[in-house]
Amino acid sequence: MRDLALHLARSGHDVVYLTMQHWDAETPPKLEGVRVLGLVHPGRIYEDERRTLGPPLRFGFAVARHLARHGRDYDVVHTASFPFFSVLAAAAARRRGGYRLFVDWHEVWTRSYWRHYAGFVTGSIGWLVQRACIHVQQRAYCMSRLNARRLMDEGFRGEPIVLPGIYAGPATPSPMGEVDPALVVYAGRHVREKRVRELVRAFERAREHVPKLRLEIYGNGPERSGVEKLVEELGLANAVRVTGHRPEQEVAAALSRAACLATASEREGYGLVVVEAAAHGTPSVVVAGPENGAAELVAEGDNGAVAASAEPDELGAAILRVVAAGPELRRSTARWFEERAPNLRIDASLELISEGYERI
């Protein structure tokens, strides 16, 4: 969204960026040529390892108020599908505002997954709210073929557009001399769906075969304390470093020097971190699954390995396959990225969206 806003501003569009006010100071973040409005404070985002309902509702109401007052100033309202209430608010104010609605669908969940995530009652309500958003008249963009298919299966009337890619960083394969052949890296949130504890257990199993392996875990979230406790219980304190949230440059440096990126995540709308790793020539280990769009980005033996499940033996074996492949797999990963770079970078996606704006 930030890159899209900047691209549109550089192209001569008048861009207003509506968001929650995540900053502490009175002055909002600076985006050149873009007016950033913090409509509401986020409040408590997570409770008991699950997203709370309050922030999405408050943001939805704030979007509704803003568009009721200013909707006629806009030709297009472009929003992420989640949190869903902003989509419903934009749809409700559209008749008065007269704008077109564009929606980015990073993820589309099935009814069964909603219930798995939030329980039968809350999950059923969440699925119904998602379905209401799907039936809103819109131009829909998806980040993966998986979610485009899901959108159609859930009743979308139209043809969703699958964006070529969303990677905005450089392509700098690491020299072999700078790579640590024993380092495994995880970068992402610490929530239940990411299954970071399962990754730690799989790492322990892999380390039984290669004792020199080390794991660096980047990111934060409600499951972090459980991850740290498990590391202590398994006696891995000297081999596993749980860093918490770190600057973007530090995470990028870790990915560049790692033997591989590894994730046990059960659900990814796209899997951008796989592309970020490949841009450094670093292969990835992911887990196959019906909710995991990241598995679309990994070809076994070309740019990493796909574990059949997050069971310690399966995932640990996948890590060992990638580590054992060494420099040859890194060269193959760099080629994989170079060959697909036009369809992985965000530039083509931004141009595609801009063309859609120009047509209306």
Image (cartoon, rainbow, N blue to C red):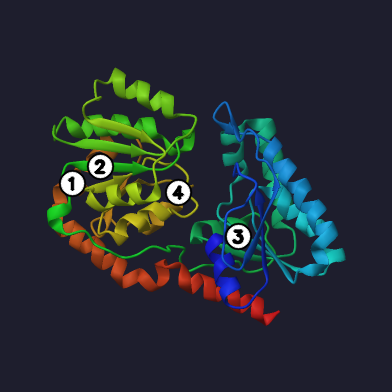
The tag on residue 354 is: none
Alpha carbons under labels 1 and 3: distance apart: 36 Å
Specify few, some or many for label 3: CA neighbours under 10 Å numbering under 14, 14-19, or 20 or more. many
Q: Are marks 4 and 3 in contact (CB under 8 Å)?
A: no
The Cα atoms of the two marked residues, 4 and 3, are separated by 18 Å
Residue lying furthest front? 26
Residue at 79 percent across and 55 percent down: it is 66
Between the C-alphas of marks 2 and 3, the distance is: 32 Å
Q: Are marks 2 and 1 in contact (CB under 8 Å)?
A: yes
Mark 1 / mark 4, whichever is N-terminal: 4
For residue 196, which quarter of the picture? top left
- Whole-percent x and y of residue 104? 60, 60
Category of crowding for the residue at label 1, using alpha-carbon neighbours closer than 10 angstroms: few (below 14), some (14–19), many (at least 20)? many
Check disc 4 and report the residue beneath it.
Answer: 292
Q: Is residue 188 above or below residue 160?
A: above
Disc ID at residue 104:
3
Give the label on residue 323, or none.
1
Q: Secondary structure at mark 1?
A: helix
Q: Which residue is mark 2?
A: 184
Q: Secondary structure at mark 3?
A: strand
**Type of residue at label 4?**
Asn
